[in-house]
Every structure is written in C-alpha cells, then in structure tokens.
Image: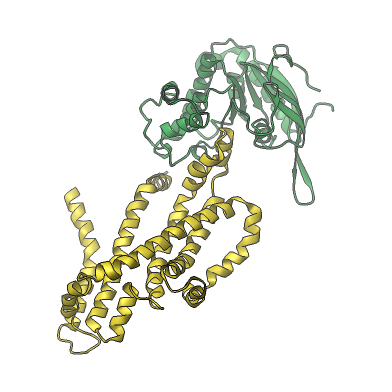
Chain colours: A green, B yellow
Amino acid sequence: MTIESPGGPSAATALLDVQRLRKVYEGKGRGVEAVRDLTFTVGAGELVCIVGPSGAGKTTLLRCVAGLLNSTSGKVVLEGRTVTGPPPGMAVVFQEYGRSLFPWMTVRQNVERPLKEKRVPKAERQRLVAEALDAVGLAGSHDAHPWQLSGGMQQRVAIARAVAYEPHILLMDEPFAAVDAQTRADLEDLVRALWKRLGVTVLFVTHDIDESVYLGQRVIVLSNSPTVVLEEVPIDLPDERDQLTTRSAARFTELRGHVYRLVQRAKDGHRPQD
Amino acid sequence: MSVMDAMRRFLLLVTVPALLVAAWWAATANSTDFFWPPLSKILGTFGETWFDGRFTADVLPSLARLLAGYLLALVIGAGLGVAIGSVRVLRAFLEPVLEFFRAIPSPVLVPVLMLFAGIGNGMKVLVIVSGCVWPILLNTVEGVRALDEVLRDTARCYRMRPHSRLVHLVLRGASPRIAAGARQALSIGIILMVISEMFAASNGLGFTIIQFQRSFSIPQMWSGIILLGLIGIALSAVFHLVEARALNWYTGLRRSQRES
C-alpha cells in the first residue's frame, strides 16, 4: 500500500504506528467516508509533517491518533499500545489557541494544570512551568490571563503547556493557521528549536506546503477525501534550518515544488492505484 | 481625574433615588390621608419599629430562611444542571418536565407544601427553594451545553480527572450562566421569603408587615416595605461583589473580544 520512505523508521522502532485507519462518519441514512485507508509510522524523535488539500481529513486523522475519535476500522498504536482514548505521554496543540486555553486561569495555571493531573510534585511542577514559559519567550507573562495576550503569544502558551507536560509525542493540528505570517515564522523556528532540544517526537499537521517542507524530516502527503497516503517525501535538507537560507536553498525549492505538485494532483482527485 | 470620576459615578448612583425620595417627601409632607402618611412620619417610626427587638426576632429569621433556601437552590440547581447538561439522555427525558415545573408559580405551591412540610421553617425554606431553583437549573444546563468543544478536547487530551474536569472545566466554564441564573433567583427569593411568611407564620418580615397592615399601623407597614427594598439593595450589592470577584476573567475576556 504505502512505500516505506528510505529514511523512515521500521515498524520495530516506530513510536507511532497507524495501521489501515478508516473513519466513516455515520450521518442520517448515509455514512460519509472521511478517511479510507491510512498507514504510516513515525519513529521516536522524528518530526513528521502531514500535508494535504483542505478537506483531506487531516483533522479527522489527528483526532483518531489523539484518541479523541474512534476509528471505524484499523488501529493506532502508540508505544506498543493501541490507542482507545487520549493516551498518557501525548500532548496536543490545537489550531484554535484562543479556545484551547482556559480563560479563567492565568498563563501559569494553564501550563500547570496538566502537571497537577499527572501528580507532578510541586517543586518539580514550578520548575517545569518556569522553564517551559521561558523556552517560549513568555517568562514575564506568568500571571496574565490568555485573553490579555496576542494570538501568537496565546499559541506560545499552548506550546509551553505541551512542552511542560514532557510528552513522548506532540501532536500539532494546524497550530499556526490563525496567526500572522511573521509570528508564524517565529513559531515555526520555535517548534524546530524545542524539538531538537527536547528530543520529542512531533506529528505536525498543516495545509501549508512551505511550512511542511521547512519543518519536517519527512512529509506525508494525503489524497483528498476519502483519504489515503499519496506519497511520503523524505526531506533531505540540512538539520540546521533558518527562514532565510533554508527557504532560499535550491533543494528547498525542489522539494516544495514536488510536494506542491502532489497536493495539486490530490486536489484534482488523483489517487494511488488501490 | 479619578476623584472626578468617583464623584460622577456617585452622582449617577444617587441622583434618581434622591429625586424619588424628595418627590415622596414633598408629595406627602402635609398629607392627612390615613393610608398615605407623610414620609417624615414613616421614617420617624423606622428606628423604633425595626431596631427595638424586631431585628433579631423577625428580620434575622427571615434572612436566615432566605439564605438557606437560596444556597440550597444554588446547590440543587447547579448540581442537577451539570448532570442534565452533561448527559444527553437525561436532558431528553427531563427537559419537557422541567418546562412544566418552571411554569408553575411557586406561591400556589405554598398550601401544598404546607401539607407535606408543615408550617415551620422547613416549609418556608422549601417555598424559596422551589422558586429559586429553576432559573439556576436552566441556566446551568445551557452553560454546560455551551462549553467549548476545543476546551473539552483539551481537558481530555491532558487526561484531567473527572473531579478536576467538573471543577476546573465544567463549573468554571458554566459559571457566567450560573451567575446569571443566580441573579434572577435572588429577586425571586426575596419575593418568596415574604410570601412564605404570609401564610401560617409567627415571625418574619412578611409576617410583621401583614400584621401592621391588619392592625392599621400604616406608617409601620410602610417602613417595612422600605426595609424590604433596602434589603434588596444590600443583597444585590453583595451579589455583585461576589460576582465581580468570581467572574473577573469573564468580564476581561468579553472586553478583549469586543476590542478585537
């Protein structure tokens, strides 16, 4: 079905293993098949981007992986365990930053809440919160409420919350779709930096082709709905990336063009022979 | 500037009440009408009527019953509201019944409640509960239903325990609506406090006012009505204070949404 990419992990070292995932939304009288057959793996420590045309079932896929949605068939295996509900060791950053932060909590309380749920001891908790907020550049905003911050800063809080949680896998669902272009570039670099520093596995869903190529070690291109994997594109750009040199590199343009053509074809309804 | 602002706010606050009192004072100054005594006479009897034993004998018991009934209604209303708002099946079953009970004016229940709960404090508290619970309950149901999906997902992803989900997500998230219901319930509660004391009571504000009425102590009766109004103002001020504290985040959020 899917071609294992040359640099991709084998099933043995895979942290996340998505096997023949299918999701049909049952409507009145008729079902809508959002995801037909998705199989891919993400290795420990990898940063994988998923890109596809809008309406490609990206969010459905992510919600299945996160255990927020039950699949119709197939399964999601995280660290050897089949996902049936939100697993421990997983953090999610949603697109709607304004709606995923608790408005009645301060920034600090927002970041600290999941740690309290994990019963992290107080001293450790305070250290993690301070470090995470420091890492996203919000050291001075501990006592602010989310709605007092700009959109980009709110998304930083959500990222800090995810990072402080010390997840094994970090899922990001079009996290920067609603922030302005400059903030977006900063946040992309922030994700790269945190990923390299913490060694966390990242699955990053986006509809932005440039973003997927700039961020990922591998880009999984989805077909249109009902979704299958169109192609896995290894991104052989140097590990040190920055907005200026990486984005102007010839190889970046090539890869971007390749992914772009794939997405265009996906929009036109092209599907692999199944 | 801030002193000027404070002055302005104070003036806005007191102008209309002052005008009304002045108008009342002027209109009744030379009144010889038995049922419409001069305001000066009413205010003259105020102190001796209420602060000569009746405050502890009548006013405090009334307020205690109001507080008990109100708090009970708050607990029952918010508790049931959370349950009904969270469980779809429960909602489907109960919503028509709730509308039915809500439509029944509580005062008509007083004779019925007397049959079951006697004529003591319990009955009066029950009357207050039976009226106050509905706005709180229905508002809580709406508040819980309107909780943001993304926020629910966030709570699930970070594996918030049922207890902390209840406290930190559901109750906090629904608190603006719960407060809106509680505000309506407060004025209903004051009305029912008086009404419950009009039947088979031996003390209380409502009881005393009715007694004055029946014994033609008209200035005293008027002073009781004024006292009721003052209690209403005081309770609503306390409510606002608590609400401003608890919903500080909500006013800020709303303001920031309006500005963006």
Tell whether B116 sits left or right of A60: left
Give coordinates of residue B103: x percent, y percent.
54, 71
Q: Residue furthest bottom?
A: B33
Percent across and percent down for residue B199 are 41, 78
Residue lying at 18% horizontally and 72% vertically, measured from the top left: B47
Which quadrant of the figure has residue A35?
Answer: top right
| Relative to B151, residue A61 above or below | above
Q: Can residue B22 be seen in this snapshot?
A: no
Nearest the eye: A262 or A157: A157
- Above-or-below relation of A148 to B239: above
Q: Is residue A109 visible?
A: yes
Where is residue A30? Give x, y as percent: 79, 48
Of the 4 image quadrants, the one containing the C terminus of chain B is top left
Q: Is residue A248 above or below residue A54?
A: above
Percent position of residue A202, x then y = 60, 22
Please indicate whether residue B29 sits to the left or right of residue B146 in the image: left
